[in-house]
Image (cartoon, grey):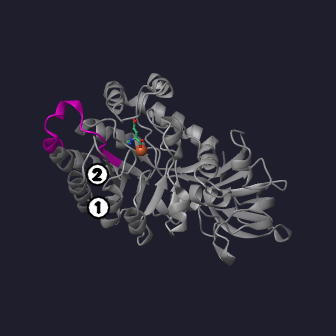
Amino acid sequence: MTRGSLVVDHIGELVTNDGRDGDPLGIRRDAALLVEDGQVAWIGSARYAPAADRRIDAGGAAVLPGFVDSHAHLVFAGDRAAEFAARMAGEPYTGGGIRTTVGATRAASDDDLRATVGRLRAEMLRQGTTTVEIKSGYGLTVADEARSLRIAAEFTEDTTFLGAHVVPAEYADRPDDYVGMVCGPMLAAAAPYARWIDVFCERGAFDADHARAILACGQAAGLGVRLHANQLGPGPGVRLGVELGAASVDHCTHLTDADVDALAGSETVATLLPGAEFSTRSPYPDARRLLDAGVTVALATDCNPGSSYTSSMPFCVALAVREMRMTPAEAVWAATAGGAAALRRTDVGRLTPGARADLIILDAPSHLHLAYRPGVPLIRQVLHNGVPR
Ligand code: NIG
Ligand code: FE
């Protein structure tokens, strides 16, 4: 018995994501799991559960890896509830509201921004999210992007520099100058706090040439590439992401056959964000088409005050199953192992020896219930780094 060890016993259904026997979820029945030093140390039959300092009796419930939310914009101030109400009354979403949040974010204190990130991070943890990526992108000055990332880095290792979210109003008539600034002083100030670089590649935001230039500068500074692509209409983003070896292209709502083929022949993950389609009343991406082509699919919340103000991965799983033709198993995999793949992480998104002991004990006997019982608080307990939360 190791000091500080913990055994989770009487697991009715354990989702490991170990991919064995052709079952991507790697489900084991009547299982137990031992945690030592914040990691999964052993998995096996409940009959052979080892002794440990502490024991949690799962009582036959399902246990799964903590959700990996690989796309979230948590550093912001204010809300845009009125914009949401206008959309529900028929207004389209254009991304134009981003500038409203930029104004509020610039005016906020560090402590206000930190409190918002902390509140949303806590909301996520209560809903089973144990790993989250956090983007900047509502500062859009050198100082405001750097402080957004500095604050984000207090909460996660997966911080993303999104200085190229939109061209801010003060640069509206000289976008080339803004791109030069993003690649120069802004990247220099942001890079020490960032693991990733992202660009909103879309009509009305950044075109392919600007996106390529910015992502190349980020790569040269040692950042990994991800991007917002093909959200509001077809465009070059997905193929650009594949060309640059992006870890993930996110949204993927409007895809051509060439986009799907490019993804299928690549290591780039397609991250789908159904909270955004829900909240902008837009058509959902066709997950089935991507899965059938052999593309790796992840699900994430896109949590932000404009297009998707949800922090709930269970909600996204339910939407993916009901609206995007994913099976419950595919959706659960995409929200855990898929998110880990989108962040190029092997330590999370699975419950196998050596992985981080990030797990969810459901108030249900099976992962199916996440989609079968939408909107119900099924997250009974979360372990993060082996610590019950
Ligand atoms: O992922 N598309 C660009 N960025 C966010 C929306 C940001 C906003 O509306 O504030 C997104 O949907
Ligand atoms: Fe986003």
Disc 2 is placed on an element classified as helix
- Residue 36 is situated, as x and y percent measured from the top left of the image, at 66, 63
Q: Residue at x 57, y 58 (%)?
A: 334
Q: List the residue tagged with mark 2.
A: 191
- Residue 129 is situated, as x and y percent measured from the top left of the image, at 59, 48
- Residue 329 is situated, as x and y percent measured from the top left of the image, at 66, 60
Q: Left or right of 307: which side holds 363?
A: right
Q: Which residues are magenta?
A: 161-178
Vertical order, 182 against 263 (above or below): above
Question: Residue 222, labelled with which disc?
Answer: 1
Question: 288 or 317, which is in the foreground?
Answer: 288
Q: Left or right of 216: which side holds 359?
A: right
> Alpha-carbon neighbours of circle 2 within 10 Å: few (<14), some, or many (≥20)?
many
> Alpha-carbon neighbours of circle 1 within 10 Å: few (<14), some, or many (≥20)?
some
Whether tag 2 and tag 1 are in contact, CB under 8 A, the answer is yes
Q: Left or right of 183: which side holds 124?
A: right
Quadrant of the frame with the N terminus: bottom right
Which residue type does callout 2 highlight? Ala
N-terminal of the pair, mark 2 or mark 1, is 2
Question: 217 or 113, which is in the foreground?
Answer: 217
Disc 1 is placed on an element classified as loop
| Mark 2–mark 1 distance (CA, rounded to whole Å) | 8 Å
